[in-house]
């Protein structure tokens, strides 16, 4: 299945909505498992996530999609290129939303790991870089699945609409 640079239109918007919803659910579930594993070392194995992460994962999905499509078009889908670019986007989105949420008086996360509090005001940290690399490795298959799901849902909606006319 190839990533595609879709022209804006009803199908592209529908695919983006379905894809963003699936990708956000993937991100939320991944975060629950990750926080459960991190806290699990203390004995509780309870994972948690803020619902304010939905727009964060949606933004990652919407930004990484065109990047992956362009990279594939240029023949740059090797891990050595794709993963670092994905991680940079993840960090950029995480920092942007962290700063934006802070301005709104919200704080769904605040990193306290040395460098994070000094440089990024607690919005990002290199402490979790291995986890973000793992997430970046999963991005392409999940993104492609989300795109396929969106196209399938759009096609089903068009068929249902055609039957009612």
Image (spheres, rainbow, N blue to C red):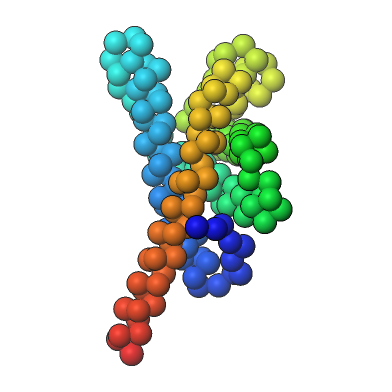
- Residue 7 located left or right of residue 147: right
- Residue 141 located left or right of residue 78: left
- Residue 12 located left or right of residue 159: right
Question: Residue 100's image quarter?
Answer: top right
Q: Nearer the viewer, residue 12 or 140?
A: 140
* Residue 143 in view (yes/no): yes
**Residue at the image position 57 percent from the left and 23 percent from the top:** 129
- In this rendering, the answer to whether 145 lies above or below 25 is below
Q: Position of residue 102 (x, y in %)?
A: 57, 32
**Residue at the image position 52 percent from the left and 45 percent from the top:** 140
Q: Position of residue 67 (x, y in %)?
A: 65, 50
Q: Position of residue 133 (x, y in %)?
A: 56, 29
* Residue 96 in view (yes/no): no
**Residue at the image position 39 percent from the left and 65 percent from the top:** 152
- In this rendering, the answer to whether 93 lies above or below 37 is below
**Quarter occupied by the C terminus:** bottom left
Question: Residue 31's image quarter?
Answer: top left
Farthest bottom residue?
165
**Residue at the image position 28 percent from the left and 15 percent from the top:** 44
Q: Position of residue 96 (x, y in %)?
A: 63, 37
Q: How many marks?
A: 0
Q: Nearer the viewer, residue 67 or 120?
A: 67
- In this rendering, the answer to whether 113 lies above or below 8 is above
Q: Nearer the viewer, residue 1 or 34?
A: 1
């Amino acid at each position: 299945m190839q990533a595609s640079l879709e022209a804006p239109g009803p199908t592209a918007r529908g695919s983006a909505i379905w894809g963003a919803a699936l990708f956000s659910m993937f991100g939320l579930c991944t975060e629950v498992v990750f926080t459960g594993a991190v806290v699990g070392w203390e004995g509780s194995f309870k994972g948690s996530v803020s619902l304010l992460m939905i727009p964060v994962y949606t933004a990652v999905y919407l930004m990484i999609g065109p990047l992956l499509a362009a990279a594939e078009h240029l023949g740059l889908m090797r891990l050595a290129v794709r993963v670092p670019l994905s991680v940079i986007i993840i960090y950029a989105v995480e920092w942007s939303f962290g700063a934006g949420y802070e301005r709104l008086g919200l704080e769904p996360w605040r990193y306290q790991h040395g460098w994070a509090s000094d440089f990024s005001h607690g919005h990002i940290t290199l402490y979790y870089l291995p986890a973000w690399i793992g997430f970046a490795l999963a991005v392409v298959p999940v993104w492609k699945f989300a795109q396929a799901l969106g196209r399938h849902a759009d096609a089903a909606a068009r068929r249902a609409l055609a039957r009612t006319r």
